[in-house]
Image (cartoon, helix red, strand yellow):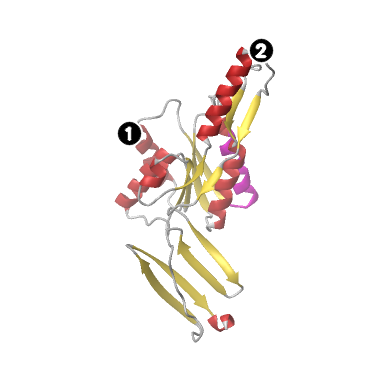
Amino acid sequence: ALDRYLGENIPIVSADHIQGGILAANHLINCGCKNVVQFAGTSVLNSSANKRHISFEKVMDDSNVNVHTIEMELNTFSKEQNLHYIDYMFNSYKDIDGVFATDNMAILIIKECYKRGIDIPKDLKIVGYDGTESSELFIPTLTTIKQPIKEICIDAVNKLIKLINNENISLESNHTVTLIKGETTWYIINISSTLYVYFSMSISVGVLYPRHLRGLLFIIFTTTSRSFWVIVEKSNLLG
């Protein structure tokens, strides 16, 4: 079975959802988020995918970050249904600064943010889950937790062949997930006790000459159609 617990003796193949939730939570924390929302599938369904929501919430709780979980009803797939939950999120949690959702839901959230005048990633950081092709094609590109779909499928087929041949197999296998950094999150990097650089993950080129600067300086630097800003305090420490 893929991502489903169908019985005690039925093998299950899935991504390492526990690690996926941890990666997503730690990334949003590193981005400075203090009040986040995650969208979860129904807990009625016995799916290994639910583990990511448990680990995500635990990391947030351990880090004293407010986390709100919106549990969606079973078989919620249509755009209209998802928009209903997104509207509920924005109306119910006015001060959120981070969201964790599936790729498809995350893309709808991005579109809704544009309609509401919410700046991504300045006002809201978004982390998806799945690593689908749409996460790379959409603008801004989505930061997401990528599931190794090919490896999962190969493993499932190999297990099925072994079962047909009456060979022994493990009942559960979890495949490593990966954090893919896109443009819907940014890091706050503390280079020294007095130098802080804030930048979007979309930035590929940038030059800063702070040698003769003193005090607090704001610099706007643009690459292609996007911009980022740098704050330098007491930059004489750089030489």
- Bounds of the magenta segment: 51-65
Question: Which structural element holds mark 1?
Answer: helix
Q: Main secondary structure of the magenta part?
A: helix
The amino acid marked with disc number 1 is: Glu
Does residue 6 show up?
no
Q: Which residue is mark 1?
A: 80
Is there CB contact under 8 Å for labels 2 and 1?
Answer: no
The answer to whether residue 56 is magenta is yes
The spot of residue 87 in percent (x, y) is: 36, 42
**Looking at the rendering, which quadrant does residue 118 occupy?**
bottom left
Instruction: Name the residue at 58% across, 36% down.
Output: 17
Does residue 107 show up?
yes
Q: Which of the image's four quarters has the N terminus?
A: top right
Q: Residue farthest to the left?
A: 115
Q: Is residue 96 above or below residue 130?
A: below
Say which of 92 and 84 sits in front.
Answer: 84
Say which of 69 and 25 sits in front.
Answer: 25
| Mark 1 neighbour density, 10 Å: few (under 14) some (14–19) many (20 or more) | few
Q: Which residue is mark 2?
A: 166
The answer to whether residue 61 is magenta is yes
Instruction: Name the residue at 52% across, 38% down.
Output: 147
Direction from residue 78 to residue 64 in the image, left or right: right
Instruction: Name the residue at 42% across, 54% down.
Output: 183
The spot of residue 154 in percent (x, y) is: 55, 28
Instruction: Name the residue at 54% across, 25% down.
Output: 2
**Looking at the rendering, which quadrant does residue 135 occupy?**
top left
Marks 2 and 1, how far apart at CA: 46 Å
